[in-house]
Structures are given as structure tokens and as C-alpha cells.
């Protein structure tokens, strides 16, 4: 075991739990270096975590919302104080540059603070009185929540579930991805330390643990972010017990450039580039395909390359000039490389972008130079698939109607963006099939935690963020106190 590596553990009912077996988590920039040993939580231990959450639920749901908020605010302050440490830990295990990891921490904290500020009003009893009597609508917590998060934004996509679940009176079993487990484990333990034992639990492990968290009869809700294919398995796993669930899934997010877009607007073009290559393209809401008017095509491609070559700098996550790090894992690297290689074999023009800062490091890590793909067809995999990596195809169109049709030609509908004169862009945005459509920006640059986020079609069920992100963890309980009266249609 390397001196700089750490051994992680599960956190069940307020105690650290070791494992008999561990998985190695490598540094994606230097795969020879092991940064963490991740416990293989057993299904038995996962059951213990669920039982701990179940046992803690009756008392926790009766705790006042004011106390829940106070405890969560203490946890938030701890996260703020330790952000530099957490960002560096995340950068090392994930591969995203430190500035990007700090941005993830900022988004996480922003959401947790918003949830604290709005939960009391959002879940307050609604009381209506009138001639017919009184009706009270209470928002009751659902119970035990399985919170399963992916590797690409592990802290943000864990806290997006943990904060609203706990604030609304639920208990939680959190499972991060083994591809980025360290920083989020620290975050979960920091939060759990502010709450009674069993309110927040942490498990690790592989598929069998996920099956337990989604099939166990004592789990009341599943909150999952990840791939659509995995979500289909989760829905089958949960079917026997008819669980509530929020699923934030894949996306093949289209960017539609309108004829009135100013290709000479350097700031807008920079936003476009960032929307494609932030976190090496490994974000669900990254703009993954660009549709450009044929009349603007050549000029757009030229200006895009100029902007990308200025912004994209590939190298170590700890190099301050670097904007793009390695891919998180070899499986993802191979998947994206295959998409790009297949496009080239079919005749597409693959153009490398940006500057490699350290060639030796580049060769040893899970790096892939960002690329622009020209000449791909709407039906090619590079356009149809969610690449989840640093490559983007540009496809020309002749009419805006055609562009909208191509943008909507997908099983996904998570986010999208429209670029051009604002009023025109808003008009076109309304025609896009997506949970969120941004105007003249995309990806996290246009994210606002005050408003609901989620997808349509096979991009998900339910919403996170906003008040809807809190209401997803409660269920209405209607108490009717009608005035007694004879009903004319019921015979005496």
C-alpha cells in the first residue's frame, strides 16, 4: 500500500465499518498511483445500513424543521472550512482540475444553503377553511432513502439528494461510485457527524450492493443519478415493492446555433467551448452536439477552433494553467476513443483542439485530447450517443425547423441550449424537448439551483434542485374535516 493512499470505510449507525475486501482506486492522471482503497461493502452490511436508517426514522421525522436546519447549517460551515482540502482530494481521485473541483464544492454548498432557506416554507402545512369545512395538507417524509450517485460530480450529486432528504425528515443510505469515492466519503461523514446515529449512512461496493439498496423492502425511495441502462435495472429491482424514485439520467444535449448568432462574439464562443469540454466533457448537461446554419458553418468552425485552442489546456489537475484533465477511468476513455475512431473511419474529419501541457503525463494517464468532429451524419454514433467525453460533432442545417427536428431526434431530453438573438432564441427554446433549455449558454454555466432540474423522455423521472427538489422527498397527507351535511344524491 502506497504511503499517500488512504483506506476508506463504510459509515453505519454512527460508526466506521471496515471491510474484508477492498478495491483499488487509481489516480487517473497517473494510473500507477493508488489514491484510495475502497471497501467492498457486503450485502449484509448494506442491510445493516438500511436497518439503521429505518430504526432512526421514527424519531428523526418528529424533530422540528428548525433543528434539522440548524444541524445542516453546521455541516455546511464545515464543508466551507474544508473546501480547499476536499477540492484537492477530489481533483486527485477524479482527474478534474482543482478549479473545477472547487466549483463543484461551490454548487454543492449553494444548493444546501438554498434547501435550508426554503424547506420550512416548502413543507409547511397548508390549511384551507370554508363553507365545506377544513382541509389540512401535511407534507410527510417518505422514510428511508437510498441515494446512489455517480463518479462525474460525486459531491454535488450526493448532496443534491442528502440535503433535501434529511431536511424533510427522512433517513438516508448513501452510495457513491467506486470511481470517485474519497472526497464524497469525507463529505458524507462531515454531514453525518451533525445528525443522530442512523440518520445518514454510507456504504460502498459494486452491483450487488446497488441491488440491495434498490430492492430491499425497507427502502421507501430511490434517488439515483447515472446512466439510463442502469436506471432500467433499478426500476425492475424496485418493482416488487413499488418504490418512489427520482432518476436523473443520461442526456445527448443539443446546442442549436441560430442564423442571427454573432460568430465574432468571443465571449459567447468561449462559453460554447466550455459547455463542451468542462470536466473533460464528463457532465450530464454538457452540450454534446452542435447544430449550425449551413450559411454560417465555415465561419463558425473557424471561430470555434480559435476559441477552443485558446481555452483548452490539457494536463495535471494541479497545474493552474490546465483547464482539462484526464478522463476519470479507462472504461470511459476507451468508450470515447472508439466513438471518435469510428467517426473517422466513416469519413468524418477529426480535428484536435487545445494544447497538451505535459506530453509525458499525457501519455501515461487516461488523457484524451479534445476533438471537433466535422462531417458526421445525424445517424452516426458520435451524434446519436451520449459521448460523455471531450469530443463534439458539428452538424449543418438549412432551416431552423430542421435544426429543431434534429435536436429532438433523440431518446434523451435532459438539457439543451439555443444561441442567438435573445427573443428569437427563447421562441426556439420552447420547441426543444428537454427538461431545461438555456439561452446563449449551456451546462453548469447556466445552472440555477433555485429552479427544478431533470429530464424528459429517457433522461429521467422527477426533478432535483428548486422547491421541487425538496418536495420529491415528501408525500402529501390530506386531513379532511368536512362540515356534516346531508348529500342530496345519497338516499336516506
Image (cartoon, helix red, strand yellow):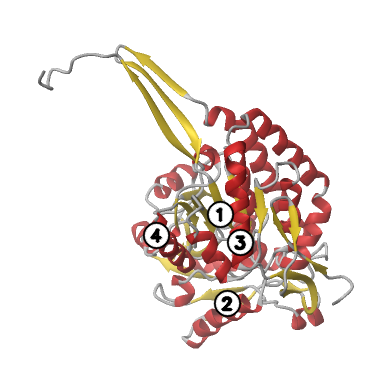
Q: Which comes sooner in the sequence, label 3 or label 2? A: 3
Q: Is residue 294 visible?
A: no
Q: Quick one: SS at disc 2?
A: helix
Distance of label 1 from label 3 (alpha carbons): 10 Å
* Quarter that holds the C terminus: top left
Image side of residue 236 versus residue 316, left or right: left
Residue nearest the viewer, comparing 368 with 292: 368
Can you tell which mark lies on residue 146? 1
Reply above or below: 398 against 68.
Answer: below
Q: Dot 1: within a 10 Å radius of its alpha carbon, few (fewer than 14), some, or many (20 or more) residues?
A: many
Can you tell which mark lies on residue 479? none
- Outermost residue toward the right in this view: 3
Residue nearest the viewer, comparing 16 with 193: 16
Dots 2, 1 in contact, CB < 8 A: no
In the picture of the structure, the residue carrying the numbered disc 3 is 46
Q: Dot 3: within a 10 Å radius of its alpha carbon, few (fewer than 14), some, or many (20 or more) residues?
A: many
Please state the horizontal and vertical placement of residue 277, each as a whole percent of the image: 63, 64
Dots 1, 4 in contact, CB < 8 A: no
Distance of label 1 from label 4 (alpha carbons): 15 Å
Can you tell which mark lies on residue 336? 2
Q: Residue 30 sits in which quadrant?
A: bottom right
Please state the horizontal and vertical placement of residue 448, each as a whole percent of the image: 58, 43
Q: Which comes sooner in the sequence, label 1 or label 3? A: 3
In the image, which is nearer the foreground, mark 4 or mark 2? 4
- Outermost residue toward the left in this view: 491
Q: Quick one: SS at disc 1?
A: strand
Dots 1, 3 in contact, CB < 8 A: no
Amino acid at each position: 500500500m502506497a504511503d499517500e493512499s488512504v483506506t476508506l470505510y463504510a459509515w453505519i449507525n454512527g460508526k466506521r465499518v471496515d471491510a474484508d475486501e477492498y478495491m483499488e482506486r487509481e489516480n487517473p492522471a497517473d494510473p500507477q498511483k493508488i489514491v484510495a482503497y475502497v471497501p467492498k461493502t457486503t450485502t449484509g452490511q448494506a442491510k445493516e445500513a438500511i436497518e439503521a436508517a429505518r430504526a432512526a426514522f421514527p424519531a428523526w421525522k418528529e424533530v422540528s424543521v428548525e433543528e434539522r436546519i440548524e444541524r445542516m447549517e453546521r455541516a455546511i460551515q464545515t464543508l466551507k472550512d474544508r473546501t480547499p482540502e476536499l477540492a484537492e482530494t477530489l481533483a486527485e481521485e477524479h482527474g478534474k482540475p482543482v478549479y473545477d473541483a472547487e466549483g463543484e464544492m461551490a454548487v454543492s454548498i449553494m444548493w444546501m444553503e438554498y434547501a435550508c432557506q426554503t424547506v420550512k416554507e416548502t413543507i409547511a402545512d397548508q390549511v384551507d377553511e370554508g363553507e365545506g369545512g377544513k382541509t389540512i395538507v401535511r407534507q410527510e417524509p417518505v422514510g428511508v432513502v437510498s441515494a446512489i450517485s455517480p463518479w462525474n460530480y460525486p459531491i454535488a450529486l450526493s448532496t443534491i439528494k442528502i440535503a433535501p432528504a434529511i431536511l424533510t425528515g427522512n433517513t438516508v443510505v448513501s452510495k457513491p461510485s467506486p470511481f470517485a469515492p474519497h472526497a464524497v466519503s469525507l463529505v458524507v461523514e462531515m454531514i453525518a457527524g451533525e445528525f443522530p446515529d442512523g440518520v445518514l449512512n454510507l456504504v460502498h461496493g459494486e452491483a450487488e450492493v446497488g441491488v440491495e439498496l434498490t430492492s430491499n423492502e425497507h427502502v421507501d425511495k430511490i434517488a439515483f443519478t447515472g446512466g439510463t441502462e442502469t436506471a432500467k435495472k433499478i426500476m425492475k429491482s424496485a418493482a416488487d415493492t413499488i418504490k418512489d424514485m427520482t432518476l436523473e439520467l443520461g442526456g445527448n444535449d443539443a446546442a442549436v446555433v441560430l442564423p442571427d448568432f454573432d460568430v465574432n462574439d468571443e465571449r459567447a464562443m468561449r462559453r460554447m467551448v466550455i459547455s463542451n469540454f468542462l470536466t473533460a466533457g464528463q457532465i450530464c448537461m454538457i452540450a454534446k452536439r452542435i447544430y449550425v446554419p449551413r450559411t454560417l458553418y465555415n465561419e463558425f468552425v473557424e471561430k470555434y477552433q480559435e476559441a477552443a485552442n485558446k481555452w483548452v489546456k490539457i494536463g495535471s489537475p494541479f497545474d493552474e494553467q490546465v483547464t482539462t484533465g484526464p478522463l476519470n477511468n479507462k472504461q470511459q476513455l476507451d468508450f470515447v476513443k472508439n466513438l471518435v475512431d469510428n467517426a473517422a473511419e466513416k469519413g468524418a474529419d477529426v480535428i484536435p483542439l487545445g494544447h497538451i501541457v505535459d506530453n509525458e503525463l499525457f501519455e501515461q494517464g487516461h488523457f484524451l485530447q479534445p476533438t471537433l468532429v466535422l462531417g458526421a451524419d445525424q445517424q452516426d454514433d458520435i451524434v446519436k450517443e451520449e459521448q460523455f467525453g471531450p469530443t463534439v460533432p458539428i452538424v449543418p442545417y438549412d432551416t431552423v425547423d430542421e435544426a429543431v427536428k434534429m435536436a429532438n431526434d433523440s431518446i434523451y431530453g435532459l438539457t439543451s441550449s439555443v444561441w442567438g438573438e435573445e427573443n428569437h432564441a427563447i421562441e426556439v427554446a420552447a420547441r426543444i424537448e428537454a427538461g431545461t433549455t438555456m439561452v446563449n449558454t449551456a451546462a453548469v454555466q447556466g445552472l440555477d439551483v433555485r429552479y427544478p432540474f431533470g429530464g424528459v423522455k429517457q433522461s429521467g423521472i422527477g426533478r432535483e434542485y428548486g422547491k421541487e427538489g425538496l418536495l420529491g422527498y415528501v408525500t402529501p397527507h390530506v386531513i379532511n374535516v368536512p362540515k356534516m351535511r346531508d348529500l342530496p344524491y345519497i338516499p336516506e
